[in-house]
Image (spheres, rainbow, N blue to C red):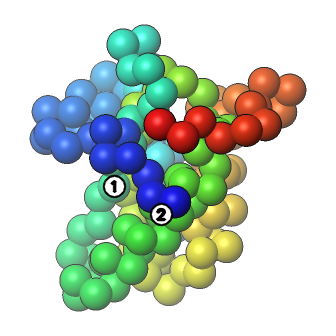
């Protein structure tokens, strides 16, 4: 199942707002920037993979893996958050498990995940 496109941050102004008004943490493979926005019904996410990561093939692979991490943990993300994931230079050699572990660590640290008692058991198919 794919992530719906309405969850993606598409405009440069959205990315800039998260960077300016939000806060971020640095992990081994990723930088996670977050901004609380009550107007957002579910959550919004954006991915940044710069040229330092390598050729387009590598950057696209990293984006696919990061989308898979978000998709797998979609139900755990608290509503009302916008976040931007920036791939660091080490991300080019990271596996899916490495990226997932780093993302979960940063997401927990920044408080965008729901407590285990509040996680819905059935996925919302919107």
Query: Would residue 17 be visible to someone looking at this image?
Result: yes
Q: Quadrant of residue 2?
A: bottom left
- Residue situated in front as seen by the camera: 28 or 12: 12
What secondary structure is marked by label 1? Answer: strand
Give me the disc on residue 66: 2
As rendered, which of 14 and 28 lies closer to the eye? 14
- Secondary structure of the residue carrying tag 2 is helix
In depth, the one of 28 and 18 nearer the eye is: 18
Residue 10 is situated, as x and y percent measured from the top left of the image, at 19, 43
Which badge, 1 or 2, is on the more N-terminal residue? 1
Asked which quadrant contains residue 8, the reply is top left
Residue 11 is situated, as x and y percent measured from the top left of the image, at 14, 39
The residue depicted at 48 percent of the width and 27 percent of the height is 42
Q: Position of residue 7 (x, y in %)?
A: 37, 39
In the shown orientation, is residue 47 left or right of residue 11? Answer: right
Q: Is residue 85 above or below residue 124?
A: below
Name the residue carrying label 1. 47
Count residues near mark 2 (Cα–Cα under 10 Å), then give few for <14, some for 14-19, many for 20+.
many
The correct choice, above or below, for 45 with respect to 60 in the image is: above
Could you tell whether 104 is left or right of 18 in the image? right
Question: Residue 55 location, x and y as percent?
Answer: 23, 87
């Amino acid at each position: 199942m794919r992530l719906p496109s309405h969850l993606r941050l598409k405009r440069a102004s959205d990315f800039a707002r998260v960077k300016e008004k939000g806060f971020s943490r640095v992990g081994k493979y990723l930088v996670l920037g977050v901004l609380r926005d009550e107007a957002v019904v579910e959550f919004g996410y954006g991915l940044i993979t710069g040229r330092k990561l390598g050729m387009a093939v590598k950057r696209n692979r990293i984006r696919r893996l990061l989308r898979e991490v978000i998709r797998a943990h979609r139900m755990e993300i608290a509503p009302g958050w916008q976040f931007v994931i920036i791939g660091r230079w080490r991300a080019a050699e990271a596996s899916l498990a490495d990226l997932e572990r780093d993302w979960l660590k940063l997401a927990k640290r920044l408080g965008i995940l729901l407590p285990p008692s509040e996680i819905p058991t059935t996925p919302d198919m919107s």
